[in-house]
Amino acid sequence: MSYKINDRVSLPNSADRIPRLGFGVYRSPPDQCVKSVHKALDVGYRHIDTAQLYGNEAEVGEALRTASVPREEVFVTSKILVPAGSPEATYEKLVESVEKVGGPGGYVDLFLIHSSKSGSAGRKHLWQALEKLRDAGKTKSIGVSNFGVQQIEEMRAYAKVWPPQVNQLELHPWCQQREINDYCRENGIVVEAYSPIVRNYKANNPTLVEVSQHYNKTTQQVLIRYALQKGWVPLPKTDNADRIAANADIFDFNISAEDMFTLDALDQGAEGAIVEAVVNE
């Protein structure tokens, strides 16, 4: 499989395309976030993933405004966790995020519902606010995160935009979430992988170390490459400048079918999640 760092993936029902590799800023402190995003852009990332929960949307925006890379070349995602009490208040909360990232009159490329845990009514409320944001031109695409099969299916009853264009999930060899992954593939939904390097908790796993030695790569590089070869859009996160660069240095090797099978065999289902495995029923 031949991939390049500037490869992009088509989104359903959209002319927009999402870069195949992303850079996450989860819990990146505000004073560090700008530096990390600059470094990511310098080494070739063109996809930045933030969220209201992370508390650094404004810093991502500052990094974009002060970077040498034109804004239109960078794909930026944010997320909303819960409704704000009314459709109007929820929409305004979305607009606040957009303006933190893009300034007045700006935009984000993708906005997601961060969690399915606000219940059926809350999910509907959030989705309708996101559709309004898209109609207003303040986001180009909309999607979900941590949604299982039934939670996406229930959206058919009210969604003007269906399917969601993205579902962002915890995905790595120990938590492959095969049922929702297969469902998304069948419905054309792009699957993003958060925590693809498992927060380094598995860096010394003997099987992973052995596979990594086959390619003279770090365990982190192998995990990110694994995610790419699974068809996911991985979102590795680090604030270490050397690792930011190393995590993008994954386009000069292929994991063999045999080694992919070995990594696939590490799956522990929901038990392998470090954040969240979805419920599909």
Image: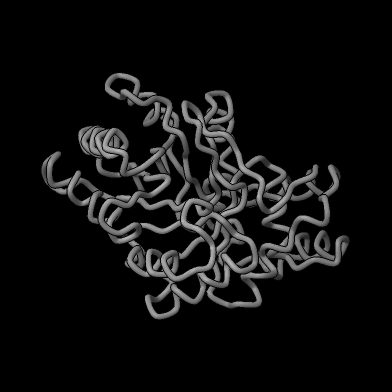
Q: Residue at x 35, y 51 (%)?
A: 79
**Residue 154 vertical placement versus 214 (above, below):** above
Q: How many labels does the image show?
A: 0
Q: Residue placed at 18% from the left, 45% from the top?
A: 90
- Residue at the location (37% across, 31% down)? 151
Mark yes or no: residue 143 visible: no
Q: Which residue occupies the extreme bottom position in the image?
A: 31
Q: Residue furthest top?
A: 157
Query: What quarter of the picture does the C terminus occupy?
Result: top left
Residue 119 picture quarter: top left
| Image quadrant occupied by the N terminus | top right
- Residue in the image at 60% along x and 59% along y: 45
Q: Is residue 196 left or right of residue 93?
A: right
| Residue 63 percent coordinates (x, y) | 44, 69
Where, by quadrant of the figure, is residue 64 drawn?
bottom left
Q: In this view, does 263 lie above or below 39?
A: above
70 lies left or right of 130: right
Q: Can you tell which quarter of the image residue 161 is in?
A: top left
Q: Nearer the viewer, residue 154 or 245?
A: 245
Q: Where is residue 241 in the image (x, y as percent from the top left)?
A: 60, 77
From the top left corner, tell me how far across and down residue 173 is, in percent: 66, 51
Image height check: is 229 above or below 251? above
| Colour mapping | one colour
Is residue 9 shown to the viewer in this render?
yes
Residue 40 in the image: state x and y as whole percent. Answer: 57, 67
Q: In this view, does 191 lie above or below 99?
A: above
Which residue of the protein is positioned furthest toward the right in this rendering?
214
- 198 vs 58, nearest the viewer: 58
